[in-house]
Image (cartoon, grey):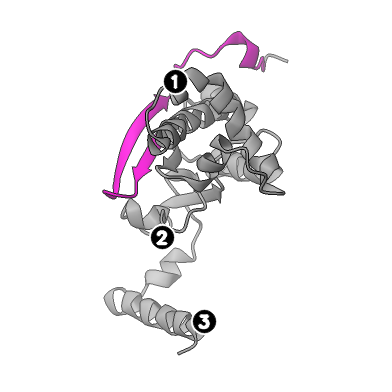
Amino acid sequence: MDKIRRMLLENKAWAQSKVDVDKEYFSKMAEDQKPQYLWIGCSDSRVPPSEITNSNPGQMFVHRNIANLVVHTDLNFLSVLQYAVKNLKVPHLIVCGHYNCGGVQAALSNKSLGLINNWVRNIKDTYLAHKVDVDSKQSEMERVNRLVELNVIEQVKNLSHTSIVQRAWLEGNYPIIHGWVYDLKTGLLKQLITLDSNTELDAVFKYDFSE
């Protein structure tokens, strides 16, 4: 059977299974969304956010890119962030990386990968800032996985440095930012860092909203 045709048939079976349990399932789902989480994750096909957190549709607003980066010049990401925080008032932002990440591996390599070099450069900056720590690990996989963790922590900090998050902290004491890493070998999530409205930011990154 054609793979695409199979997917469409699987969709019909899934939709019917939902209606069999609750006839109003899709009419309720079509109402305005009120997600509790913004998931900022890696595009890796092995890390589906709803499945690994056992979340239902409507609970999670999602943005995914290579190596779960928070880039301050990425208008796609910033639009997602602003809508989630300002319009949907999502109370929790989750940056989730995963061990054995290909994007992080690329950042540890000097191999040219074409266009992706420009994206991976963001991870290389994190590597440079923590080079002694990362290079102290004995095996290549240990170095990759340590940089995975450091990258998540850095992206959480990047979130706290946005005016979008800082204004929400000032006006509503939300959101809480969480940094997690997913272990492909165990299926388990590990918490690395949490920031909230009480976090003291370096003055360099702190915005003044008084005007």
Q: Nearer the viewer, residue 180 or 85?
A: 180
Structural crowding at the residue carrying mark 3, measured as other residues with C-alpha within 10 Å and reported as few (<14), some (14–19) or many (≥20): few
The region drawn magenta spans: 180-209
Q: Earlier in the sequence, mark 1 or mark 2?
A: 2
Structural crowding at the residue carrying mark 1, measured as other residues with C-alpha within 10 Å and reported as few (<14), some (14–19) or many (≥20): some
Estimate the x, y position of residue 64 in percent, counting from the top left: 54, 49
Q: Nearer the viewer, mark 1 or mark 3?
A: 1
In the image, which disc is placed on residue 133? 1
Estimate the x, y position of residue 199 in percent, counting from the top left: 46, 17
The reply, left or right, for residue 154 in relation to residue 122 is left
Is residue 211 shown above or below 51?
Answer: above
Marks 1 and 3 in Cβ contact (< 8 Å): no
**The residue under label 2 is which amino acid type?**
Pro
Disc 1 from disc 3: Cα separation: 45 Å
Q: Secondary structure at mark 1?
A: helix
- Provide the residue designation for mark 3: 4
Q: Secondary structure at mark 3?
A: helix
Question: Who's the residue at 46% across and 28% down the image?
Answer: 150
- Provide the residue designation for mark 2: 57
Marks 2 and 3 in Cβ contact (< 8 Å): no
Q: How many marks?
A: 3
Quick check: is 200 in the magenta stretch? yes
Disc 2 from disc 3: Cα separation: 22 Å
Q: Secondary structure at mark 2?
A: loop
Disc 1 from disc 2: Cα separation: 39 Å
